[in-house]
Amino acid sequence: MTSALERKVQSNGSATDRDPLHAPPRLASVRERKAITATTVKLAALFWLCVFVSDSILWGIAGVDPIKSALGKIITNSFGVGLTLIVTASLFRLRYASIFIKVLIAFTFSIVAAAILSGIDILVYIWFVQPVNWSFDQIVFGHTMISSTGMFFGWSCLYVALLYSFEVRDRERSLAQAREEALSAQMRALRYQINPHFLFNTLNSAVGLVEEGANARAQRMMISLSTFLRQTLELDPMTDVTLAAELALQEDYLEIERERFADRMRFSIDVEEAALLVMVPNLILQPLVENAVKHGVEPSTREVEIRIVAWRDGDDLCVSVANDRFPGDGHQTRAGSRIGLRNVADRLAARFGPASSFATKPTPTQFRAEIRLPWIICCQVS
């Protein structure tokens, strides 16, 4: 038996470790803070390195020895780094404020910090150069103020952009998680829609076959049913499968239904060989095939053919599921049919957006549903 301590350890290290998207809010906030801090440190190091190098080059062009002035620039820039930390901390605390507030704070701080750094620059100059007759030069101080203001405001804008990039990434992660949950819910709804109806009808048909003495057919039907249900329940709703795998599943389904309607159902599958490796969403054809059986075969008194055809059209894969219709057989559009078809349209829109489409084309003699999605090959055939 598993002890309470073992169960607690297992529960604490399960979903969070496996999937960072589903981490608790507090843990996600800590991870975000660490990620922002690490990125800020790297960005600040690069920023001040560029400032130091550019200062050395520009002052070297002006005639100042970059080697002799290096220590003074390092001391001055060190104070600049300290001032940068202040505005960085302020902007981080206000990262959810409006952009106008951030710009106002950044601009105000840049002026104040520039004045402080300009004063420190004068003190460093006096300390290292020790001029005999030094007087305050407003023009030099003004130039230093202007360059320092631009430098601090540039860093503030850079940091605001950094925070915005993390915010955008967090929103994208949230949207991806919401989309994943929506698709999972759709897949669960699809399974709940398929399994009870299909299960009850198949079981009733198997009982009927046993009563008629067709034990071999009943056994074959139950084995096929078991295989089909196991495959559908084990499918991952967030992964795609090849068209070949999807068609194999639908063929199993149609074989079971053909046992039920042996006297009035046949089906055919016509697919281009290259299309078998194209990736499609799991169970995307199931509602279409079930709809063809439910509203094409069941109400009919004559033989109905269900045809699945797939072909390439430019950069798209087209798949159609069609069934015969006969006037006077009482074909009606039921609520379950609309739900299943809408499920297909919603899944295609969520997965591929405008790159996909879904359409139904009913005629007096045929009902055809057609999907179009991008041609994405699973792997190359050697």
Image (tube, rainbow, N blue to C red):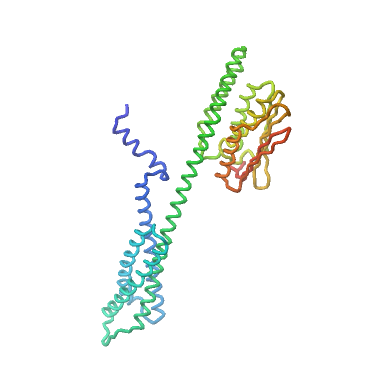
Total label count?
0
User: Percent position (x, y) of residue 364?
Assistant: 73, 33
103 or 159, which lies in front? 103
> Residue 337 is drawn in which quadrant?
top right
The image position of residue 333, as x and y in percent, is: 64, 32
Q: Position of residue 372 (x, y in %)?
A: 64, 43
Q: Please tell me whether residue 278 is drawn above or below residue 44 in the rendered image.
A: above
Q: Residue 180, relative to residue 259: is it above or below?
A: below
Q: Quadrant of the C terminus?
A: top right
Q: Residue at x 62, y 12 (%)?
A: 212
Q: Residue 292's quadrant in the figure?
A: top right
Q: Is residue 279 left or right of residue 173?
A: right
Q: Image check: 53 left or right of 266? A: left
Image quadrant where one finds the N terminus: top left
User: In percent of the image, x 58 and y 22: which residue is there?
Assistant: 202
Q: Residue at x 37, y 73 (%)?
A: 148
Q: Position of residue 96 (x, y in %)?
A: 39, 57
- Camera-side residue of 252 and 165: 165
